[in-house]
Image (cartoon, rainbow, N blue to C red):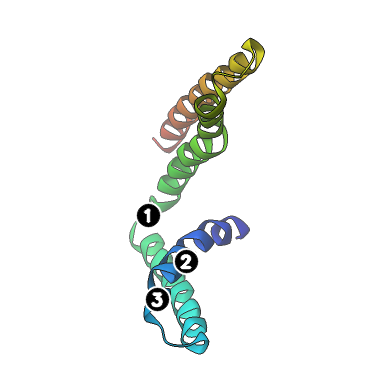
Amino acid sequence: ISKFTLTMFPLALGFEEMLTGVLPSDLAMELLDSVVKIVLIFSSLGVAMFFPSFSFLCSLVGLICTMIVSVIFPALAHLKLFGTTLSYLDKTIDWLLVIGGSVIAVVGTIATLQEDV
């Protein structure tokens, strides 16, 4: 349950930030905050009820996005930002993280696909 909340919070925050300039008061913002979160929860519930393989989809998206955001992207960003000043060891570690994260993402995706078949 906590993973769902952690996933939905940035999405709700994004919707709220898009509408912040339109709302006249803090009370309207608080109301919008509650409405956005309730709509997201019920829309997720509706998707889960009408698509039987929703858990499969969630596991696939979670695996791929988690590996990209938490392993591959930071290492590539580190290489891009500091590549000219990094030592050979630092570059090697970054590339090992990129390659290892990619391999784990591919293996995890294959395992998820085979598990559901």
Amino acid type at mark 2: Ala
| Residue highlighted by disc 3 | 21
| Residue highlighted by disc 2 | 12
Whether the residues at callouts 2 and 1 have beta carbons within 8 Å, the answer is no
Quarter of the image for residue 94 reads top right
Q: In this view, does 5 lie above or below 20?
A: above
Q: What element carries label 3?
A: helix
> Which disc, if any, is residue 34?
none
Q: Earlier in the sequence, mark 2 or mark 1?
A: 2
Amino acid type at mark 1: Pro
Whether the residues at callouts 2 and 3 have beta carbons within 8 Å, the answer is no
Label 2 and label 1: CA atoms lie apart by: 25 Å
Could you tell me which residue is drawn at 37 percent across and 67 percent down?
A: 46
Foreground of the two, 44 or 64: 64
Residues packed near mark 3 inside 10 Å, few (<14), some (14 to 19) or many (20 plus): few
Q: In this view, does 17 lie above or below 10?
A: below
Amino acid type at mark 3: Gly
How far from the left and from the top, in percent, is residue 41? 46, 69
Q: Is mark 1 on a helix, strand or loop?
A: loop
Quarter of the image for residue 24 reads bottom left
> Where's the C terminus, which quadrant?
top left
Q: Which of marks 2 and 3 is nearer the N terminus?
A: 2
Quarter of the image for residue 92 reads top right
| Residue highlighted by disc 1 | 52
Tell which tag, 2 or 3, sits nearer the viewer: 3
Could you tell me which residue is drawn at 43 percent across and 66 percent down?
A: 45
Q: Is mark 2 on a helix, strand or loop?
A: helix
